[in-house]
Amino acid sequence: MLGQLQEAGNTTTLPHYLDLLSGAGMVTGLKKYTSQPVRTRAGSPKLQILNNAFLSVCSGLTFCECRQLPERWGQQVKSAVGAHLANAVHSSSLELCYWRDGTREVDFVLRLGTKLLGIEVESGKKAHRSGMEAFKKAFHPKRVLLVGSGGLPWEEFLRIPSEDLF
């Protein structure tokens, strides 16, 4: 978005709009996780919907149609997991971020004090775990968790209080 806006002041206007949208319970920005706090603030946020109804209504698909499209269903599941985490973080001492290094990524990083938890969401048949391995090697988290195909079922994950994941 910022690249589209050339006028001075837009670097402060966009974060302000994101704060307003977050306060309204619509969307929030997740910071990129890094062990260097200065670099965390410099990165662009990853947008996370706080209520999956926004994603569902904009898709124009029924629930059954969405379930038949693996890529679309994967987006719904990943968004539901992110919304669950973002809403849980809102009223706790947890911090929610994402992590990416080149093509390797971890969908969500939860931090509780000095403890880290990496969460990768997979809803397809093939899980891409190179990001999880790179994250483990770089940051030595308390644990990494695969949610979905080959891991903890997403329906079960959504029932677990976020603090209990550690």
Image (tube, rainbow, N blue to C red):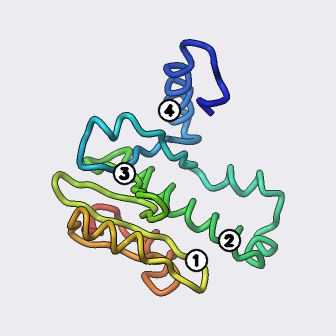
Name the residue that disc number 2 marks: 73
SS label for mark 3:
strand
Q: Name the disc covering residue 123, or none.
A: 1
Residue 66 x %, y %: 76, 70
Q: CA distance from mark 1 to mark 3?
A: 21 Å
The kind of residue on which mark 4 rests is Gly
Which circle, 4 or 2, is nearer the viewer?
2
Residue at 61% across, 80% down: 124
First in sequence: mark 4 or mark 3? Answer: 4
Q: Does label 2 or label 3 sit earlier along the sequence?
A: 2
Q: Nearer the viewer, mark 4 or mark 3?
A: 3
Q: Is residue 164 left or right of residue 30?
A: left
For the residue pair 151 and 164, the one nearer the viewer reads as 151
**Residue found at the very far front of the displayed protein:** 102
How far across and down, in percent of the image, does residue 2 sit? Answer: 59, 29
* Residue type of the residue flagged with mark 2: Trp
* CA distance separating discs 4 and 2: 27 Å
Quadrant of the image for the C terminus?
Answer: bottom left
**Residue 78: image x %, image y %?**
55, 65
In the displayed structure, does residue 135 sit left or right of residue 115?
A: right
Kindly state the secondary structure of the residue where label 4 is placed.
helix
The first of marks 2 and 1 along the sequence is 2
Type of amino acid at the residue the image marks with label 3: Leu
Judge from the rendering whether residue 139 lies leftward or rightward of residue 8; answer left or right: left
What quarter of the picture does the N terminus occupy?
A: top right
Q: What residue is shown with label 4? A: 23
Disc 4/disc 3 C-alpha distance (Å) = 16 Å
Q: Are marks 1 and 3 in contact (CB under 8 Å)?
A: no
Tell me which residue sits at (57%, 19%) in the image: 10
The residue at which mark 3 appears reads as 96
